[in-house]
Image (cartoon, grey):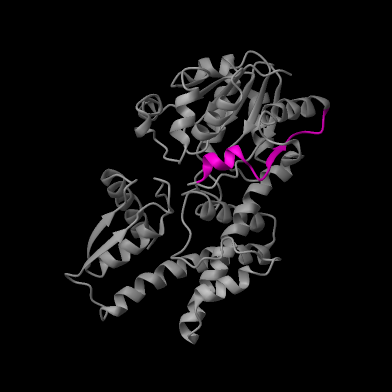
Amino acid sequence: MKIKNICCIGAGYVGGPTMAVIALKCPDIKVTVVDLNADRIAAWNGPLENLPVYEPGLSEVVEKARGRNLFFSTEVDKAIEEAEMIFMAVNTPTKTEGEGAGMAADLRYVEACAKNIARVAKTDKIVIEKSTLPVRTAEKIKEILDKEGSGVHFEILSNPEFLAEGTAVQDLFKSDRVLIGGDQTETGQEAVQALVDIYTNWIPKEKILTTNVWSSELSKLASNAMLAQRISSINSLSALCEKTGANIEELSKAIGMDHRIGPKFLKASVGFGGSCFQKDILNLVYLCKYYGLEEVAEYWHQVIKINDYQKNRFAQKIIDHFGGDLTGKKITILGWAFKANTNDSRESPAIYVAEKLFKAGAILEIYDPMVSKESIFRDIDFYWESSKKAI
């Protein structure tokens, strides 16, 4: 199957950069990124220095492909109708109410997306899960498409993203692996091959892995859980180092020199943040509990608990240094995004540390060259209010 038109629903951190690179590397394919958020689409179509997502190298990619075969639009139905292949890159936050609240993934946007595709599609489509989803979500998507569609044939693929914010464009250019999960039927494998053919325009074939759908869906959650586990592991040891007089940087270096372990993700920090790690681990915990694997669930939940412990411990050290009272003390926080080279501050440890210092009486001055003042205030309003509700 030769793909001529691709539609991506969702113009966020995953959809925007991924489709920009596909458009750049596949100039014969029209790529349209759609989103109901008109301001976001306007930003993608606006000045390159003001793109809604900041990633090193992204503006250069967009500049080359935008208007040639890369388009950003709010005309969702039109893009769905034209496309042979549709990527779903919508938000999958953690549920805040109902069964699984606080852990399970909220699939309302995925389900709404599937219903819209079913309503609009008049020709056969390949529908691709790009958002991070719990295992067996493809089954639910297929059920919606078949039930609410008008008799056209849908093939569901899982193609999880493995991007690290701050290096996303480089990750897309030189991926460690591209994972594509599909049904083992003849039509399922044809759909898999259609996506393989797109990636082989720049990714070596040996780095493209094809699996069943369930393995692909679970691989994303498992990969993020393993990475977060390493961060929590070294952070837990940093607490022990402070009690014993050991140096955590020396310890990290010694551990990382073991070729079986390696040095990556072994740098002690205030804790991990971002939109993926905590959300995906909590999702994994919920899945384990759902299938009765209580011990496995608790094992992975401990990764989150250590991360929370590290953030609180860091802030408490500052408070203790001033005798427990920060009233009138000015404290500068340099950096608000959850990591370097990004403007994404979702779940940033800085938010939680700032809240604890502020409640202890501190006057805070916050600076981040990539995060706007408005975004910082939005984070404070959202996360601080959320913590009050949790208490």
Q: Which residue is drawn at 49% across and 45% down?
A: 93
For residue 170: magenta?
yes
Of residues 41 and 114, the one nearer the viewer is: 41
Q: Measuring 39% from the left and 49% from the top, which residue is drawn there?
A: 345
Can residue 285 be seen in the rendering of this structure? no
- On the image, the x and y values in percent for residue 263 come to 60, 64
Is residue 176 part of the magenta span, yes or no?
Answer: yes
Taking the spot 32% from the left edge, 74% from the top edge, the residue there is 318
Percent coordinates x, y for residue 142 in the rendering: 68, 30
Q: On the picture, is 121 further left or further right than 180?
A: left
Side (left or right) of 42 relative to 272: left
Q: Where is residue 49 in the image (x, y as percent from the top left)?
A: 35, 33
Residue closest to the eye, 261 or 116: 261
Left or right, 213 with reference to 279: right
Q: Is residue 282 above or below residue 185?
A: below
Compared to residue 225, the image places residue 253 above or below, namely below
Q: Is residue 259 above or below residue 154?
A: below
Check the picture and name the quadrant holding the C terminus: bottom left
Can you give x and y, in whole percent of width and height, for residue 24 in the image? Answer: 55, 26
Q: Residue lying furthest bottom in this view?
A: 244
Q: Which residue is drawn at 46% across and 63% down?
A: 271
Q: In which quarter of the image is residue 103?
A: bottom right
Q: What stretch is highlighted in magenta?
A: 167-185
Q: Quadrant of residue 322?
A: bottom left
Q: Is residue 229 left or right of residue 74?
A: right
169 or 225, which lies in front?
Answer: 169
In the picture shown, does residue 175 fall above or below 324? above
Which quadrant of the rendered structure holds the N terminus? top right
Q: Is residue 163 visible?
A: yes
